[in-house]
Image (cartoon, rainbow, N blue to C red):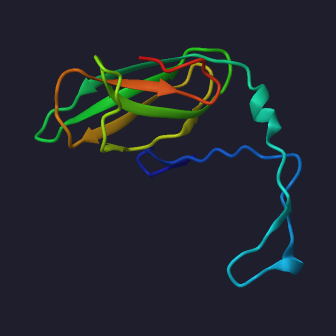
Amino acid sequence: ALHDAGGALRSRNFYWLSTKDDVIDWADTKWYYTPTKSHADLTALANLPPTTLAVSARPLPGPEAAAMVTVENTGKALAFQVRLKMVDARSGEEQLPVFWEDNYFELFPGEKREVRVAHSGPTAPGLVPQASAWNTAGPAH
């Protein structure tokens, strides 16, 4: 994680590393393409224990239709590739376009994160956030 002089988080990175690297076929490189002989082994992702998420939103003041979405890993395992979306509460249809401050991130057990979202569509109060992850059973509302 990278923090500025005031202690505010500016950047964070998370990497899932394989125990087996990609094997690149450098001998068969073309000017537009380099083939891969074998890919990294990421099958351990399929064995991540399930976890649960909680999500909520509070509107932000101002002329823009924006909210601060809070998502928390309420389970006991890593939440991998947390995906946030705004949906119509009645139909379940995703609202687009939506502009997220961040998306597809990880949360450790008990970790909570706030992410700003803005949208240019209708500002109906029926929009609600959903959160899901690689290893959750379904979306949290």
Q: Judge by depth and name the residue closer to the eye, 43 or 118.
A: 43
Q: Disc count in the image?
A: 0
The image shows residue 28, relative to residue 96, as above or below, that is below
**Image spot of residue 101 (x, y percent):** 38, 44
Looking at the rendering, which quadrant does residue 39 occupy? bottom right
Looking at the rendering, which quadrant does residue 95 occupy? top left
Residue drawn at (89%, 50%) of the image = 20
Q: Please give left or right for residue 141 compared with residue 3 in the image.
A: left
Q: Residue furthest left?
A: 63
The image shows residue 11, relative to residue 35, as above or below, that is above
Q: Quadrant of the C terminus?
A: top left
**Image spot of residue 62 (x, y percent):** 12, 38
Residue drawn at (36%, 25%) of the image = 129
Residue drawn at (40%, 32%) of the image = 85
Q: Please give left or right for residue 76 compared with residue 18 in the image.
A: left
Residue drawn at (79%, 26%) of the image = 47
